[in-house]
Image: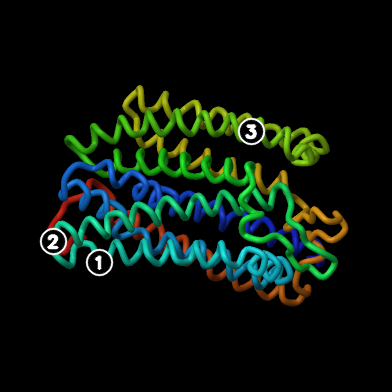
Amino acid sequence: MSHDVLALVWFALLGILLIGYAILDGFDLGVGILHPLAKGDTERRTMMNSIGPLWDGNEVWLVTFGGALFAAFPNAYATVFSGFYAAFMLLLFALIFRAVSLEFRSKVKDRRWRTLWDFGFFASSLLAPFLFGVAAGNVMTGIAVDDRFVVHNGMLGQLKPYPIAVGALAVCLFAMHGAIFVYLKTEGDLQERARGWIWRAFFCFLAAYLGVTAYTVAEVPRALSNFERVPALWIVPLLNVLAIANIPRAMHLKMPFYAFVSSCCTIAALAFLFAVALFPNLVPSTIDPAYGLTVYNARSSEKTLGIMLVVAGVGMPCVLAYTATIYWVFRGKVKLDHSSY
């Protein structure tokens, strides 16, 4: 493969890793966002245990994405992580505190202790997708990167209306995704309440989706340039709309698994649209477009990309096999026992 082709392959692989993380950890975060709506300690434990065997494996996809970005596009990695340092530290804190909340909550049978960790689980689960959305919104609109790839945006400068709107969209999307997952994994009163959460989260997501779509067209007109250049790409927004429309249809027909599949497809389509709207940029510059980082000027050497592709060819099937095995072993409804969270 040529150097250009290898760079394109790694751009696609990064997209696949991002989609995998958003789908798998998306419902984990959604369960955390909905956690305060549970009634009583048993329902809260049931919700936590619905993701108990899965959440840590799901986050491996994010770690792999970060490692692949560092190795394949080191200039982009350095620029993004230095420019968003405070935001990434906050995100890291949220992910760590979420894990600690899951593990610590049931260690002490005290109402105040469990209330503290319940709040930590909810707050960190809410903060993480919001920060992901804010980061995506900033990348879409562009960042003040100079000719030395140094970012001049402060943290407050990153909290502009458009990135905040994208952050709200991410929260609504993951809440809907998590509600469908809770419905699939539970039964009885909690499952019936989850049905109501699905409908409320869906309409919140739909309003945010329509608003952000219109906002993107107005705020980032270059997002449509690749679609104008390759009209066949319009099939993806069409499929995205169909996937969104199938969620309420599947729930109305009492087919929650198909609603969950449609939610997964919605996330995948949105991530694909983000990548297409951004390509070939990785970090657009608002100072001068020539200063922006692209797939071609931020890539590693041809040899590095080639060796990494071989490693990915060996490692990715192992990751997929492990993920499939875990989900198969822990399929079915949640049952609480002495070893549960």
Q: Mark 1 points at which residue?
A: 104
Q: At x 34% / y 59%, what residue is drawn?
A: 326
Q: Nearer the viewer, residue 55 or 328?
A: 55
Task: Compute the Cα span from label 1 to label 3.
Answer: 40 Å
Q: At x 69% / y 58%, what residue is drawn?
A: 11
| Mark 3 residue element | helix
Left or right of 116? Residue 321 is right
Q: Where is residue 163 in the image (x, y as percent from the top left)?
A: 62, 46
**Residue 110 circle label:** 2
Left or right of 215? Residue 172 is left
**Residue 213 circle label:** 3
Cβ–Cβ under 8 Å for marks 2 and 3: no
Q: Upstream in the sequence, badge 1 or badge 3?
A: 1
Q: Mark 2 or mark 3, which is nearer to you? A: 2
Q: At x 33% / y 34%, what residue is drawn?
A: 197
Which residue type does callout 3 highlight? Thr
Left or right of 228? Residue 124 is left
Characterize the local packing of mark 2: few (<14), some (14-19) or many (20 or more) Cα atoms within 10 angstroms: few
| Mark 2 residue element | loop
Q: Upstream in the sequence, badge 2 or badge 3?
A: 2
